[in-house]
Image: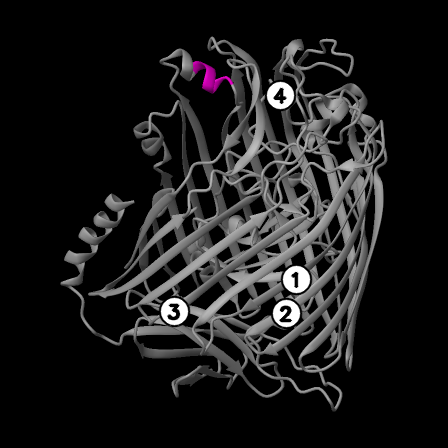
Amino acid sequence: MKNIILTLIFITIPISSFLYAQNNGIIEGKIIDKKSGQPIIGAIVKIIGTDIGAIANSRGEYRIKNLPTGIYTLQFSTIGFETLTEANISVTNARPTIINEEMIETVIQGKEIQVTSSYFNKDVENSPSTQSLNSQDIRRAPGVQEDVIRATQLLPGVGISSAGRNDLVVRGGAPFENLFIVDNIEVPNINHFGSQGSTGGPLSLINIDFIKNVEFSSGAFAANYGDKTSSVTKITLRNGNDAMFGGQANLSATGFGLNFEGPISSKGSYWFSARRSYLDFIFKLAGLAFIPQYWDFAEKVNYKIDENNTLDFLTIGALDNVQLDNSSSSDLYSNSRVAIPNLKQYFSGLTWKHFDENGYSNLTLGETFSLFNTFQNDSLGVRVFNNDSKEAETSLKYDYFWQLSKTSNLSFGSQLKYATSLKYNITIPGNLRTNFEGQFEPLNIDTSYHALKSGTYITFSQDIERFSYTIGGRFDYYNFINKKLYFSPRASINYQISELTNLGLSAGTFYESPSYIWMIGDPQNSNLNAFQANQVVFSYIYNPRNDTKIQLEFYQKWYKDYPARIFRPYAVLSPSGFDDLTSDIPFGLEPLSSSGIGYSHGIELFIQKKYSEIPIYGLMSLTISDTKFKSLLGGYIEGAYNTPIIFNLSAGYRISNLWEVSGKFRYASGLPTTPYLQTGQLDFTKYNQGGRLPAFHSLDLRVDKRWALSNLSLITYIDVQNVYGRLNVSGVRWNYETNKPEYLQSIGVLPSIGINFEF
């Protein structure tokens, strides 16, 4: 820790000699009607706490010049539209800060209701179980390593699977129950070293520098989202700077990267990013035998055809590789305890957005591709498990939003997904794949197949003074399973008690098809159905200030047709990645039955204070819940991710425009465990009945410092995770050297520095 602090000081002291005071920061952008896409002429843009502002011109464009480097809050207002507030806007002297705003027409309210400016996007965050984050919320959160998924783990209802991973465990559901959408592209996994058949991994491959905002829904989401049962994470990436060329070089807790962006004539913009991890250097210096390395690349092009039509093209890819140092017998043994997850992946999409007189439409042609090479060796270095798989999907997605009137709208759409290439070459020896009686059931398969999915939805929404409601439904079709057609009704209603208080109730049915790799685990898996979750959510929201929200929610989920394990008849399926074949069968490669049932219910409290004229920001979430499942044998037992208590507290204070301090504390009940037999095998007759792991808790602290340099900007930070050195336990495994179970513990204090140059 001492060496890291001294290094940062030596880096920053020489730089300070070049500092100079110059008010040359710029904020600019365009303001449009969210529902029609037309520019809003004469909209007023004001920097809160100052007399500085601007008025949008005939094209809806505005520009505010000569701003000191720092963080600002903008207010957007005009007659006939809701007043909006955008906080956490970072301004540097390196290049203009682009803030494009979509404003919503004011709905005429009852006489008792007055509409005021809010720091919260009411169109999003008054929806039950839905929160939003912007890039600054994510960047400044201590201990999340500028990772969008780790930032959402601070929100209510999201559990902890392991300190070193960012699998989302939402309201008791497994990580494979979560949907991720990036710029209208549905992505199966957005993580480096991602878990096959699930959505988790150790680190997101989305570059935070290009995130515009994130909307996270932990349940009861609208009918335009399907084929998932727990959550939706919708990530919108910003466009490139269309005013001038610029870039950024950064060094973070996990790697280093370089970004470029700039205009394309007067019609559009682009950005490009390349990053490489330095985890391999750190792991080698630490003498570890398991050495991960990754690259990721991303680019986005935005082109404006005319006033009513735009094109966006996005591609994000990653190369993940693990090197093994087997130079000693202890290294061989250590590396024999984990399946090695090498992965090459990308997703790409072309989106046409069209505005007309009554609304707008999106048409997206997308493709996702994953090439897995997962293997595990024994303690002699001999390969005992091999998985060479390719999964590729091509999709076509159409959505239309139709504004029927100022108080009602209709949206509908459809998506077609064709899995053009599902190829699997997998070998598991019998001693690592046994049935319930302990008999060997080896798997040696070389096969391929195709799959077709489609989903069509329609949703109607209306505001009637204090009331607003949404009703809708969707049909989903899956050609590769037993029952092929599913209907999912959805509905929600909100009642605005006063200007400060809102009540909400949402309910719906949600279906999810089996992961592709599950289908080749056994011939009988073709008889699987999509599993079902019925959900009800009651929400109470109170805004004591325009920058503060208090939200209380009660939820209930009922699962049906959940994948039950025939070889492990007391268990339902719950893989979470980095599987160890000596402990269990990986990736659902076993006979499964649509016979599991379960439930999850809980209460969540969420308090959030946005950065405003009071330079304190933060959030607190508390979840009290219970999740249980019933498989083929026995009664209800605890779910693999049942965490009765989850508590998060994150807060920050901006000392000045140049200095900021923040901290985060997390607590969660330990996960349930399955005891071991004396042979070193898990005793699945006592599945999840071996007691709980020790509780997880940790404290992270962070200090940020901004610098204004000639023609560039510098941001530095020190982030210390797990300040008091808690050795949190992520699991239990059998040690064949001692013939005893042992805890898998995280490392202690983890300091890191970050340096971002903007030019």
The x, y position of residue 125, in whole percent, is: 64, 67
Element under disc 2? strand
Q: In this orientation, which residue lies closer to the viewer: 721 or 267?
A: 721
The x, y position of residue 137, in whole percent, is: 48, 61
Q: Which residue is mark 4?
A: 583
- Count of labels shown? 4
Of label 1 and label 4, which has the lower sequence position? 4
Q: In this orientation, which residue lies closer to the viewer: 304 or 73?
A: 73
Of label 3 and label 2, which has the lower sequence position? 2
Please say whether residue 759 is visible from this viewpoint.
yes
Which numbered dot is residue 605? 1
Q: Which residue is mark 3?
A: 654
Badge 4 amino acid: Ser
Residue 335 falls inside the magenta stretch:
yes
Badge 3 amino acid: Arg
Which segment is the magenta one?
Answer: 332-336
Q: Residue at x 61, y 34 (%)?
A: 576
**How far apart in space, not on screen, are marks 1 and 4 (Cα)?**
37 Å
Image quadrant where residue 647 sits: bottom right
**How far apart in space, not on screen, are marks 2 and 1 (Cα)?**
8 Å
Q: Are marks 1 and 3 in contact (CB under 8 Å)?
A: no
